[in-house]
């Protein structure tokens, strides 16, 4: 594990860049550097510096949300959910909400399947990331981009 | 705080080993803390922070919410029908007030 990490450590910028590429490819608004750094910082705080791998996590959100106050979310993690190989925690992270961490779902092997549905708020058009911590300590991530036409968190008057 | 209205949908009977989906919703505004009232005074944050489910006394699911969770927090999750017994659903707001609901499931 250690040599692999040192191999990957210098390429954190690349990770940020790849996240950016995904986002900008599909969205009209590109995130500012500060927003991407806030999301990336939170990810590395959760993983304690480890680089999450892409895959296994499937985050399903509507491509277009008319109302950012209620966006339905489905997260599926590819895991056998046995006592020695299961998903411990799923983090839902937002790129542009005032608070990056939206929710955490803690699972056990008794879930049978790593699938959670919920409703979240999105401040604006952005990328949402689901980060899964496995029982073996590895992290996997998947993301989805949502275009929000009516934003949450804004003042009514 | 009084018990908040909740809705829980789960099968009342299941076959042993089946994976059942449980849908839950609690009526709560999930006030973000970012809004202001009519006179411009900030409305303080008031959210449900945790939701936990035990099945036969063992915790099978737990969620931590921030203000990014929509009003009337809805969560659907799965659990394996292991034995006939009681599921206890507990929601806590940030002042520690609890809303607790119980449901029985018969496993054959």
Image (spheres, rainbow, N blue to C red):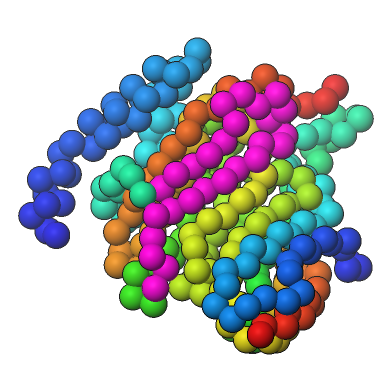
Is B72 located above or below residue B53 in the figure? above
- The residue drawn where x is 73% and y is 67% is B10
Residue for point 60% across, 43% down: A73
Instruction: Please state the horizontal and vertical placement of residue A34, each as a whole percent of the image.
Output: 42, 28
**Quarter-wise, where is residue A148 in the image?**
top right
How far across and how far down the image is residue A110, in percent? 51, 74
Rendering coords of residue A120 (x, y %): 65, 42
Left or right of residue B19, residue B92 in this image: right
Q: Is residue B54 visible?
A: no
- Identify the image quadrant of residue B53: bottom right
Residue drawn at x 68%, y 64% is B22
Residue bounds of the magenta highlight: A57-82
**Which residue ends up furthest to the top in the rendered image?**
A28
Magenta residue check for A72:
yes
Q: Where is A34 relative to B47, above or below?
A: above
Q: Is residue B91 left or right of residue A141?
A: right
Q: Is residue B51 visible?
A: yes
Q: Residue at x 72, y 28 (%)?
A: A67
- Residue B34: x, y in percent? 72, 36
Residue A71 occupies quadrant: top right
């Amino acid at each position: 594990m250690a040599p692999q990490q040192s191999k990957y450590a210098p390429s954190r910028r690349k990770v940020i860049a790849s996240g950016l590429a995904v986002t900008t490819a599909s969205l009209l608004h590109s995130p500012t550097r500060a927003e991407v750094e806030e999301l990336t910082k939170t990810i590395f705080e959760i993983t304690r510096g480890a680089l999450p791998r892409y895959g296994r996590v499937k985050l399903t959100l509507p491509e277009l949300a008319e109302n950012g106050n209620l966006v339905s979310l489905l997260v599926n993690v590819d895991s056998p959910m046995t006592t020695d190989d299961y998903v411990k925690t799923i983090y839902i992270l937002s790129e542009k909400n005032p608070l990056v961490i939206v929710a955490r779902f803690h699972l056990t092997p008794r879930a049978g399947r790593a699938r959670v549905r919920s409703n979240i708020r999105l401040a604006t058009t952005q990328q949402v990331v689901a980060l899964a911590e496995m029982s073996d300590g590895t992290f996997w991530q998947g993301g989805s981009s949502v275009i929000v036409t009516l934003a949450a968190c804004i003042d009514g008057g | 705080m009084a018990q908040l209205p909740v809705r829980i949908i789960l099968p009342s009977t299941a076959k042993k080993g089946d994976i059942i989906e449980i849908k839950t919703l609690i009526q709560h505004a999930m006030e973000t803390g970012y809004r202001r009232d009519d006179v411009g005074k900030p409305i303080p944050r008031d959210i449900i922070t945790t939701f936990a489910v035990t099945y036969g006394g063992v915790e099978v699911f737990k969620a931590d919410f921030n203000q990014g969770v929509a009003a009337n927090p809805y969560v659907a999750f799965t659990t394996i029908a292991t034995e006939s017994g009681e599921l206890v659903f507990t929601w806590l707001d940030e002042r520690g007030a609890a809303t607790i609901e119980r449901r029985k499931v018969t496993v054959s």
